[in-house]
Image: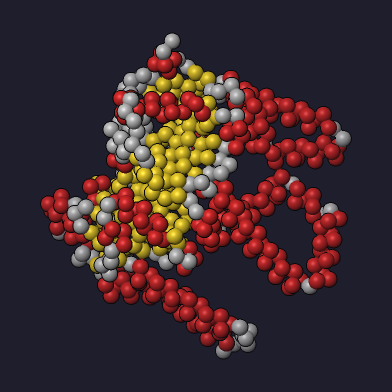
Amino acid sequence: MNSTQRSEQWQRLSPRMLLVHPLHEVLRELPLLVAVVVFGSATDNRPWVLAVVSVIAVVGVTRWFTTTYRIEPDPEAGRVQLRSGLLRRKVLSVPRNRIRSVETDARLLHRLLGLTVLRVSTGQHAAADSAFELNAVESSEVPGLRATLLAHTGQTAQAATGSAPAPAKVLARWRPSWLRYSPLSLSGLVMVGAAVGALYQSGVWAALEDSPVSRSWLQAAEQFGVQQSLTLIAALLVVVSMLLAVLRSLVTYGNLVLSRSSGAGGDVLALSYGLLRVREHNYDMRRLRGGTLRRPLLVRLFGGARLDAAMTGVNGEGESSILLPPCPRATAEGVLTGLVADPVVVTGSLRPHGPAATRRRWTRALLLPVAAGAGLAIASAVVDLPHWCWPAWVAMTLGAALMAVDRVRALGHRVDAHWLSARTGSWEQRRYCIATAGIVGWTVRQSWFQRRAGVATLIAATAAGVKAYRVIDVPQEWAWSVAAQASPWVARSAWARHG
């Protein structure tokens, strides 16, 4: 039986998943298991614990027996189908000509067993229960499956002809020095919060509240002093969150390699990363429409940036669009410059948006400090305020003024017949570079306050990335001329000329 005939039949996932599914089900139901263990220990009904674990393991084994997939042979008219479920059967079906990318993912246990999770992406947002995922196939089958699923895109034409692949050009490689940007994010605090939430949900926190350990901690805190204890806890929280952020970044993005290779079907951008969980993405360069440099405030102060891709067929939100995690700004800008082949688009100066946009930045930044100052002045005439109120107000006003200056300096755009670039933001400064050939529509939007100020928000619609890219607070008399410069067909629209 040849591979084409085999692909037409319903096939099962790798039998090695009989070892993985039960363990995953046990981990998924861990809060339930903790509750059962606590209940069984309290009531001396330990057989219940064994029974629950057995049922969960059987459910995991059943998943393998009830999951099958099929790839129809016609690359244009055929479909990829996935059947799953026992009591509620579900069939996912994806037209092969809608497939835009194939991603692979291998967690530690999968790697030890020689397995790989394969995900099919059409570029449309899919809920967790409707994503097309083969979990999992043998790693040796992945190249053949990827070639079959992407046959209609031309990415595999070179492999089909048997010609030797051109050596890939490495655009960026992960460096340990990139870890210095990790503590500047909130990922560590999110992990601490998730751990505390899991303790609450599982009932462990409630059990600890009345335990001798918690009572001894409370006694020690009272002896040490409440204020000193809270300060120590806050310091420990900061240190732990920073360490967790560094550890997460190392495990998630370690060994990252971004490379570009040429073939008969066009250039392909390949991204692989991860220490324990290895992920691989292949992007067709013909679908690239630009990228976005993201620079959160703290990362920006230390000279860092993150690079996201704007590409059709790839979700513009989340990790699926990340090309480079926080890294030196020069590295991110260099990679984006190589992708768009125009350094001016990435690092060139931008056109400021004029005095009206500047006034809006200052007005919005100082609105809260002015209101707070008025409130303090009124309150001070009635009651005695704590001594720290006015110094805190001065610090808040100074911070708001610095943010206004930063937002004014960031705001701007540049446009030509090939690229649209715009920059905005302070807490997270973003500069995006979008190919005008991929822009399919324009919208000029004005709020009541924008109309009063004589500015507008220009929105470029595209099938790539986040779908809508905004040029904030453009003078309203510029709006349609900017759109027409990027998309000449706009100038021929009567409603745009009179807008």
Q: Residue at x 58, y 42 (%)?
A: 276
Quadrant hosting residue 383? bottom right
Residue 95 shows in the view:
no
Quadrant hosting residue 111? top right
User: Image height check: is 123 above or below 215?
Assistant: above
- Residue farthest to the bottom? 381
Badge count = 0
User: Image height check: is 285 above or below 444?
Assistant: above
Relative to 449, is 328 on the left or the right? right
Q: Residue at x 56, y 84 (%)?
A: 391
Q: Residue at x 34, y 30 (%)?
A: 164
Q: How is the image coloured?
A: secondary structure
Relative to 478, is 371 on the left or the right? right
- Give whichever of 37, 367 is nearer the camera: 37
Q: Position of residue 52 (x, y in %)?
A: 74, 30
Q: Position of residue 151 (x, y in %)?
A: 34, 27
Q: Residue at x 85, y 40 (%)?
A: 42
* Position of the N terminus by quadrant: top left
User: Image height check: is 385 above or below 173?
Assistant: below
Q: Position of residue 401 (x, y in %)?
A: 43, 77
Residue 183 shows in the view:
yes
- Residue farthest to the top? 1
Q: Position of residue 331 (x, y in %)?
A: 40, 57
- Give whichever of 302, 218 is nearer the camera: 302
* Position of the C terminus by quadrant: bottom left
